Image: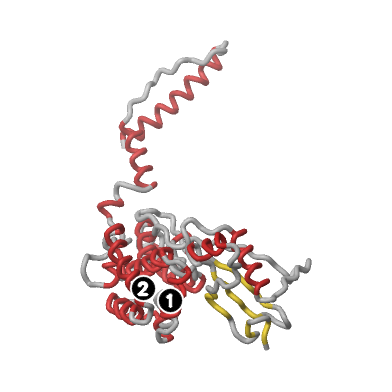
Amino acid sequence: TMAGPYDKEAMTLFDYRTDHFNDNDPQQLEKATTAPTFLYVMPLFDNKIFVEETSLVARPAISFQECKDRCFQRLAHLGIDVNYIDTEEEEEEFSYIPLGGALPLRGQRVIGLGGAAAMVHPSTGYHLCRMFMGVADAAVTIRKGLLPPPPQGNQNNAATTTTATMTLEEIAASAYHAVWSPDKIRQRNFAVFGAEFLMEQDVVGLRGFFDGFFRLPLELWAGFLAGWPGLPNNQYHETWFARMWFGLNFIVRIPPTVGLAMLASIITYSLQAGTPLLQSVTPLFGEPPSYEYDNAVQANIGDVAAKEEARRMIQESKYTKTVPVAFGLRDEEEEGMEVATVTATATVAATANDD
């Protein structure tokens, strides 16, 4: 029932042990302490297991080679042999997941979803289920915006199906608002702080952090890992009061040194980043900027506005009817063709100007 020290019927998460580093190599042990990595273990079949040495969150990122070296050293210490077989079933995987980052730019018509819309969980890197939920919300909004207005009175329905209810700018703004409403941004900001705090911790702090985290009731820690409306247990994190309650339950379960470090980090983070964390756990300090369509702003930006401005500038500009004749024209016919071309162009411009 065991593969080395690991149970074949259970996954192992967040193995932050460092006893596989030799005391004779204090430099390597120091690196593993200040820039920690952990091991995932997932049993597969027979006597095979999937192992993954991972840096949870770091800035700058720990290199792939460093993670690989630590993984092999850990497995050798545990008496596990790594056998490479040149078949399709045996694979070596490298994964790089950007966490946090900026939310999508407001006012754009290009709708980003998934990783392009910063939907990756800022603390855990989980993404797929969050993306599916967010895409569904955006799709409903886009479809609603593209539908034509309903017919009025006894009008022929065919005459009312040529124009969508909303402009493309309004549709894009509504889609982003569906994905990133102020309430969702508040919840995300809470997780962003979590990632920043985790980056400050050494391996001892992370052990204490996760020891307390998994002592929480299942619905609290599972809801944090999901972290998106509609996913299981997210109701325990959707409001500022729920997040405050989660934080209070959590901080009393972690070692005092980690708890004091977290309180200090809350202060320093708020001084540096401003109000996002405070908005996420209190009803004060306003709310994050909305993605909702702002006509006063949108009227002056975007590619449609730029094209309209270019059209107006062309209409208002002066043009020259007399154009120098190109070199090489030797007969009346060629010269007439050139003049005709210029005249036609001038006529079009004049017509546009008259409009």
Residue at image coords 65%, 80%: 43
Residue at image coords 36%, 48%: 302
Measured as percent of width and height from the top left, residue 97 is found at: 52, 62
Q: Nearer the viewer, mark 2 or mark 1?
A: 2
Residue at mark 2: 257
Q: Is residue 61 above or below residue 248?
A: above
Quadrant of res 6: bottom right
Measured as percent of width and height from the top left, residue 60 is found at: 48, 56
Q: Is residue 302 above or below residue 134?
A: above
Q: Nearer the viewer, residue 196 or 164?
A: 196
Local SS, label 1: helix
Residue at image coords 48%, 25%: 341
CA separation, marks 2 and 1? Answer: 9 Å
Confirm whether residue 150 shows in the render. Answer: no
Confirm whether residue 213 shows in the render. Answer: yes
Q: Nearer the viewer, residue 274 or 76?
A: 76
| Residue 335 located left or right of residue 78 | left
Badge 2 crowding class, 10 Å Cα cut-off, few under 14, some 14 to 19, many 20 or more, is few
Earlier in the chain: of badge 2 and badge 1, it is 1
